[in-house]
Amino acid sequence: MEMFLRSCDGKHDDIYLPDGTTTYVGRSIETKISDKKCSRKQLELCADYSTKSVAMKMIGTTPSSINNCEMAKGESKTLKENETLHIILNLYPHQLIIKEPEKAEKSEKKRTISDFFGGGTSKKPKLDSNSNVDSGDEALVKAKLEKLQKQTFAPSTGSINSEKSDELLSVENTRGAGWYNVGVDMLVYESAGLKHSSRVVAFDMDSTLITTKSGKTFAVDNKDWKLLFSQIPGKLQTVIKERGKVVIITNQLGIGKGKVKEVDFKKKIEAVLEKLNVAAQVVAITKRGKNRKPNIGSWKWLKEDGNGGVELTDFTYVGDAAGRPKNWAPGKKKDFSCGDRLFAMNLGVPFFTPEEFFLSQKSVKFEMPSFNPKSIPLNAPLTEGGDVTSDKQEVIVMVGYPASGKSSFVKNNILPKGYVHVNRDTMKTWQKCVAACKQALASGKSVVVDNTNADMASRKRYVDCAKAQGCQCRCFVSTVTIEHAFHNNRFRELSGSEHDIVPAMIIYSFRKNYVEPSKAEGFDSIVKFNFVPKFDDNEQQKMYSMFLD
């Protein structure tokens, strides 16, 4: 049985409600709701499959309703099948949909990882319902991953992350064993006996397949390694016996930085594969860029060029960078990142930690990044608290992080209305900016000051210009957080944008010096402006919504 929240207006896809897992609904991409009266976390939902109902708690500020009965903030109610939920009172109607499982022959029963490896009585790994996933969007991602994980290693179709029923394909590698380069940032090794397959189970290497003999975090030389678990070779052999392909996808920035010699790394890989006693393909990413996890360039190459002409339909990833906090198991350190899990999330494929995959351990709590690029609404209002431009002469002082979209906002929404653009990047000094502002005001024009303007002193210069001219002065403050700014900056770099790439030090400097603007500084009003991204094509939009390295 599965439960879903369905829009009565058919405005969006059904929202999956996993059993016992908290899901938030409100203003989001998933619900297609952009109404600012609706909070991003308007309602907290938790499905109970045993009672075929959903426990709900209203946490937004605007009332919701069930069957036209209004809910107050903090109030809890139960939603049952065929009852109507309005996410906002009298708006956005939804109903609970329950889908019963179709009956299937025993031979078609899907296997868990434990079944796949012969441990038929163990429970299948699944994402912990206590995971730190704070937004409705992230909960939806988690739920989808949970569904995908349940499909892993289906016996007849081999379908891990698609519903295709095509027969599993496997072909001999015709390239021959050895190393070759892909572009300037990927080293690829294919061992003797490798077979390409439509099913791929891919692994990180360090702390997933191997660990250091020395006990140090980083290997002291190319011989400082040992297998992480004794069960690994046998379980990799099982993947191959089931006509799958073993691939190792590993970030190796040390090679690109010259800290690790390429020749030593190659020797290490060949020794590891000999110890594992499996035919495998290794993809090592040596520089930052589109190929480095969690970016998905390495997977794209594998799908398009690295799989011997066989269509890649089933892909699972196993890695240790899973966002687990300190003491996720007794005495265990915090994971150094969440990169491996985010790589799988970007692809929408099943993900397992080494402990889950090789030892059939239960999943544990993990923490997601504070910024989720999938949560950025593409149709948010441009401003909150005021119009974008005015018929009266004025000075607009922009405030926000570098890479927060200030210049694009100004270019697309303010300059077309005849405002004079004052920008320190082009004018170089604040003195020239102030002079240009005074000159424009004296000629009767309005001005927009497109700088970061983090502190009161930098803003006062332009407030004084407006006062001297006797015109209004408004402050436009960006809603972009520092994490969002870093994401925008990285997206610019990866997408080849014409925007300058901002050094991290400059972004941190804004945070250090930032003082929240107030009307007490002399502003007539404070207006919030939102980042509403625009894309050249669908590929750009897909990249923007991913977790980027």
Image (spheres, rainbow, N blue to C red):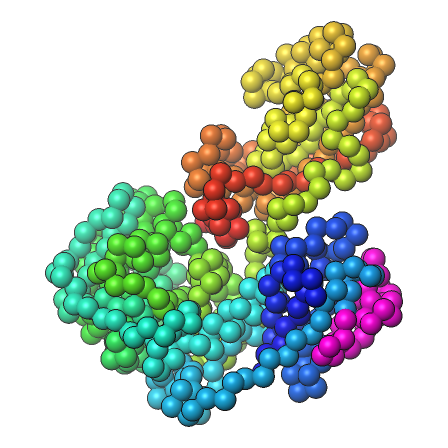
In screen coordinates, is 28 left or right of 84? left
- Asked if the stretch drawn in magenta spans residue 346, the answer is no
Q: Is residue 124 above or below residue 483?
A: below
Q: Is residue 49 above or below residue 485?
A: below
- Residue 134 is at least partly visible in this image: no
- Residue 376 is at least partly visible in this image: yes
Say which of 108 and 137 sits in front.
108
Q: Position of residue 392 (x, y in %)?
A: 81, 19
- Asked if the stretch drawn in magenta spans residue 74, the answer is yes
Q: State the residue at coordinates (50%, 69%).
A: 145
Label tally: 0
Q: Position of residue 230 (x, y in %)?
A: 31, 79
The quarter of the rendered structure image containing the N terminus is bottom right
Q: Quadrant of residue 196?
A: bottom left
Q: State the residue at coordinates (57%, 60%).
A: 368
In screen coordinates, is 39 left or right of 311? right
In screen coordinates, is 144 left or right of 177? right
Magenta stretch bounds: 55-84
Q: Is residue 144 above or below residue 295?
A: below
Q: State the residue at coordinates (61%, 43%).
A: 482
Q: Quadrant of residue 437?
A: top right
Q: State the residue at coordinates (27%, 43%).
A: 184
Q: Position of residue 249 (x, y in %)?
A: 33, 60
Q: Position of residue 529 (x, y in %)?
A: 71, 37
